[in-house]
Image: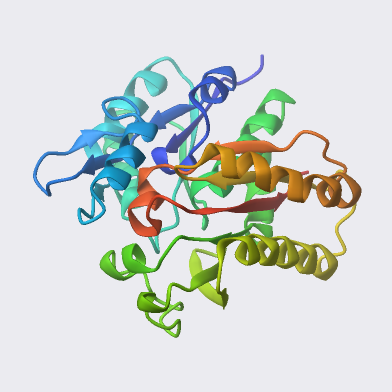
Amino acid sequence: MQEKIQIVSDGSLDLPNELVEEKRIKVVPFYVSFDGETYVKEKEELDVREFYQKMVDHPQVFPKTSMPSVQDYYDVFEPLVKEGTAVICICITQKFSGSMQSATTAKDMILEEYPDAKITVIDATVNTVLQGLFVLEACRLKDQGLEYDRIIESILKIRETGRIFFTIGSIDYLKHGGRIGKVAGIAGSALKIKPLITLKEGEIFNSGITRNRKKSLEKVVDMLKEYLDEVDAKPGEYSFCIGFGYDRKEADEFKDMLKDLVRERLGIDEIGIYQIGATIGVHTGPYPIGVGIIKHAE
């Protein structure tokens, strides 16, 4: 008899609700606050579009997020364990959030009460739409009927292949959120420069600057090309998507810039466009845009 397996992720996966429902993913949301006191659950109590609209309408207000609590994870895990379902829980990189720690503590509590429970908590080492691609790989393997341990083994092997290449409107939010890290060498936002950023293995790295948005988008395409050359990517080997913040129209135009390259090098005709959620949006501001790529698990 096929073992029942449930894929769980925190809200950093940034996949559309309809895709989450189609793939039957259980999502444990982050909390968002615009006043530092009142926190609401992202997507459940605050729509992502509304989140960005507030940022655009109130540019002097810097929202904050708070990770899911131990109780939040416990409330998701317990009903699954009671019905004998094995759980694979994928969390945002520990370098960005304590979400994984909440999940791990909840898992330990569950195991005290239900010693036979099967729960594995995985550090995605990535976030946002790239975490979404990683979670979708786990779902794909589950739907193929792979065994629990094999799914875990297979997805762990692809984590280091994940990359996000992106640009943002300004570095104000990165500065304010304390995520400046490896991007600290970038000149001040008064110059109106457009930083280019690479995310890999849970950290952000400065990949240069441009003077306007169009050039920054062209540079993101170049960064993708360079990575495809570096790994000698073949059609069918990778999954890929576009991530954007407030401006869907810009994302559609960006797709046109990418479609020939993605079709030729990755064999992908239909590019997914996913909205980056609040967990990352509080650090990037309303205008992040870029691409996520990760190798298919085998």
Residue 64 placement, left or right of 93: left
State how many labels appear. 0
Look at the image and tell me whether residue 132 can be seen: yes
Residue 65 placement, left or right of 80: left
Q: Where is residue 283 in the image (x, y as percent from the top left)?
A: 36, 58
Residue 298 placement, left or right of 5: right
Look at the image and tell me whether residue 105 can be seen: no
Figure colour scheme: rainbow
Q: Position of residue 19 (x, y in %)?
A: 57, 24
Residue 292 placement, left or right of 173: right
Viewer-proximal residue among 222 and 191: 191
Which image quadrant for residue 220?
bottom right
Which image quadrant for residue 49?
top left
> Going 34% across and 35% down the picture, which residue do you hit?
29
Q: Position of residue 286 (x, y in %)?
A: 40, 50
> Going 69% across and 31% down the picture, which residue do you hit?
140
Tell me the quarter of the image containing the C terminus: top right
Viewer-proximal residue among 280 and 213: 213
> Going 50% across and 42% down the picture, which residue do you hit?
247
Tell me the quarter of the image containing the N terminus: top right
Q: Where is residue 235 in the image (x, y as percent from the top left)?
A: 89, 47
Q: Does 43 sit above or below residue 102?
A: above
Q: Does 246 sit above or below residue 179?
A: above
Viewer-proximal residue among 208 and 88: 208
> Going 23% across and 51% down the picture, which residue do you hit?
64
